[in-house]
Amino acid sequence: MKVEKPIPVMNKLQLISDENLGDIERAKGEGRKVIGFYCLYSPTEIAVAADAIPVSLCGTKNDPIETAEETLPRNLCPLIKSSFGFAVLETCPYFVFSDCIIGDTTCDGKKKMFELLNRYKTTHVLQLPQNQDDAGALPFWREELERFKKLMEAETGVTIDHHRLRKAISLQNRERAARKALMDVNREKPAPITGSQMLEVLSKVAFLADKEKSIALMEEMVCEAKEHAFRPRDSKSNSRKRILLTGVPVGIGSDKVVRIVEEAGADVVAFENCSGYKKTFQVDEDADPLDALASQYLQTPCSVMSPNGGRFDLLEEMVRGFGVEGVIDLTWQACHTYNVEAFQVNEFMEEEFGFPTLHLETDYAQSDTEQLRVRIEAYLEML
Ligand code: SF4
Ligand code: SF4
């Protein structure tokens, strides 16, 4: 049996991830505040500018869902139930460390869940417009960010001026650029990093408190992956179908579709979702910083926006750029916005690229694994 050599930079990632909670605890001990975030629409730069530590919160595992269902309806998106369950059970250390939580009014389930979450930890909810293009949407969102800035100032005692905001934007632009460069490695054929490896890296890096550490690590990964692929190559590597995953966010624990695709002999080479490419935009460093944050974050191409034209632009660029041969559109059960938008995504792919998407609706449980496998294998066969 061929034994795979450990990849040194992946070991380093594990080491840094293991140190992460200690880093946060130490920073808290020194008086820094920890702010928990759930969604891509909230600019973490505002917390960084207040010298606080922004952390992503857990929500990709099935275990806490049973507890969440004692309070929340069963027929709700697993991401929302998992997030709530983690909070109630106090099994997400990042939630436990957080001094307060920032949510935003993205979908109905999430915003109603935040009302209940507030009983466990102070949860500030930003009012997100439902449309990116109306004349009133941007000024409204900028006002919300002004309110968010004041909240952070009150929480930390730090006055957030332009200089602090610009520094935070510049740091996070570097982080997003490193993230993009890492994902762009897989534009190469065959993809040097498997979808599972990419997901593991992106998920773990998202939890790192020290942004300089995460930037350095991702840059090192890019160099290493360009030098020698993270995966063994064989005669079949070039014939593996190249798949793009779009739709809802995925992470460690909610990655069954990625695993099944790989077991079926194909590669997920691109992630057009919040876990992946949607987090790679750049914020204008020359404009008024709050204007720049409001305008860039509002453009996040998520299905909660109506309409959501940016998603199709991003899909088009990625399908071409990554040499994609098939698109899997993933919807978590009871996520109405992604579910409805699936029709348009399929129509777009057929018209622009001449192949349909495979739309899958599932949850975090493993009970439908074999059913998904049959559908994924049939789709790959058809491509
Ligand atoms: S999919 Fe939309 S609502 Fe969900 S985390 Fe991403 S931006 Fe937020
Ligand atoms: S996946 Fe859909 S239902 Fe779930 S939190 Fe995101 S937008 Fe809401």
Image (cartoon, rainbow, N blue to C red):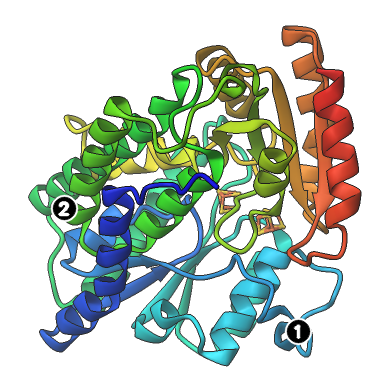
Seen at 26% across and 66% down, the residue is 15
Between 183 and 259, the one lying in front of the other is: 259
Q: Is residue 299 left or right of residue 47?
A: right
Residue type indicated by callout 1? Glu
Q: Is residue 283 visible?
A: no
The percent position of residue 236, horizontal first and vertical second, equals 62, 22
Work out how far the residue at label 1 is from the one at label 2, CA to CA, in angstroms.
Answer: 37 Å
Residue type indicated by callout 2? Glu
Q: Secondary structure at mark 1?
A: helix
Q: Which residue is mark 2?
A: 212
The percent position of residue 129, horizontal first and vertical second, equals 57, 47
**Residue 44 picture quarter:** bottom left
Query: Where the C terminus falls, by quadrant?
Result: top right
Q: Is residue 171 above or below residue 224?
A: below
Tell me the quadrant of ligand 2.
bottom right
Q: Is residue 129 above or below residue 34?
A: above
